[in-house]
Amino acid sequence: MRTRAPPQMNMAELASRVQPRDGELRSARTHRTTVRTRLASSFDVSRLAPIGSHARGTAIRSFSDLDVLVVLRRNEAKWGGSIVSSATVLGRVREDLQARYAFSDIRRDQQAAVVNFAADQQSLDVVPAIFHRFETGRPVYLIPDGSGGWFETSPETHDRFFLIANARSGGKLRKVSQLIKWWKFSRAQSIPMQSFHVDILLAVSEICVGVKPYTHCLYQAFKLLADRECRGLRDPCGIAGTIYAAQTEHQWQAANVAVSFALDHARAALSAEVVKDYEEANRQWSIVFNDTY
């Protein structure tokens, strides 16, 4: 009796399974509302907006943190006519949130006050910002640079750039980005690659445009990262300078090793698909995703 070959791994189905859960999205909305209410009672807040993967629709379940931009009126960052150190503003925001979330761990990283909620696994990165100028009709803000200074960013501009590229791909870009992020977190120790870099690099490359399966898009994504050796990307919107794949030299080296490993097995998976050896193709993709597909 002839044995039926196993079906080819369905990447579109995997992409649907890694979407944020409804409970996570509800918690995100609740956390944002609570944070805005708290900070508005202590600071002159202009607006609070979701940024990052959740804003671009590339967040994945369990792993994507919440990021919010808290835009403060300029008077909150001025002293004697000059803008104070971003570390000072960030410290004030962290202290205020600690008073609200007394039972939660709140730390300060380079650009945000990070709230690790005691009730669930989500953390919220609160990034203080000051309006700076308009660029092509969209606001540009100053946010902490990690060294006490400020640098420019425009989440609305980058989100629009990504969404336009996603539309050109027929919606495939967003899901490929989510699959790359699932790969990032599928290892015992997550791969230290910046999600923003992944989103913008894939949008610029247009590797998701055209009629091609997700497996080919994934292979091309890994090849692109490998060919570029995970180097920084010049911001195509001309605002953020260089968008780096990793924050440190050690992380950059680790990312390159992980990308090379994934590319080798993605290439082997595609070769197996060509000869319809789906069992081997699935085995290779299983290695890429560390049996988490």
Image (cartoon, rainbow, N blue to C red):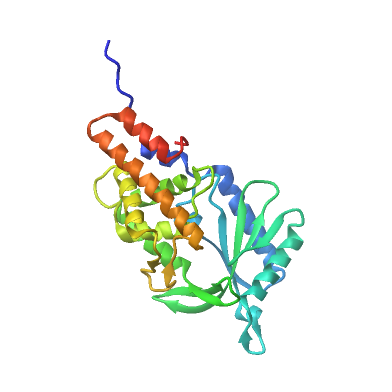
Q: Residue at x 58, y 70 (%)?
A: 146
As drawn, is 146 to the left or to the right of 242? right
Instruction: Tell me: residue 255, above or below residue 130.
Output: above
Instruction: Looking at the picture, tell me which residue is in the foreground, 254 or 127.
Output: 254
The image quarter containing residue 166 is bottom left
The image quarter containing residue 150 is bottom right
Q: Position of residue 238 (x, y in %)?
A: 38, 73
The image quarter containing residue 10 is top left
- Looking at the rendered structure, the number of numbered marks drawn on it comes to 0
Q: Residue at x 49, y 42 (%)?
A: 186
Q: Position of residue 89 (x, y in %)?
A: 65, 74
Is residue 134 at all visible to an observer of this figure?
A: yes
Q: Residue at x 30, y 50 (%)?
A: 220
Q: Residue at x 51, y 79 (%)?
A: 132
> Which quarter of the figure is the N terminus placed in?
top left
> Which quarter of the figure is the C terminus placed in?
top left
Is residue 171 at all visible to an observer of this figure?
A: no
Instruction: Looking at the picture, tell me which residue is in the foreground, 284 or 217.
Output: 284
Q: Position of residue 17 (x, y in %)?
A: 46, 38
Residue located farthest toward the top when viewing the structure as drawn: 1
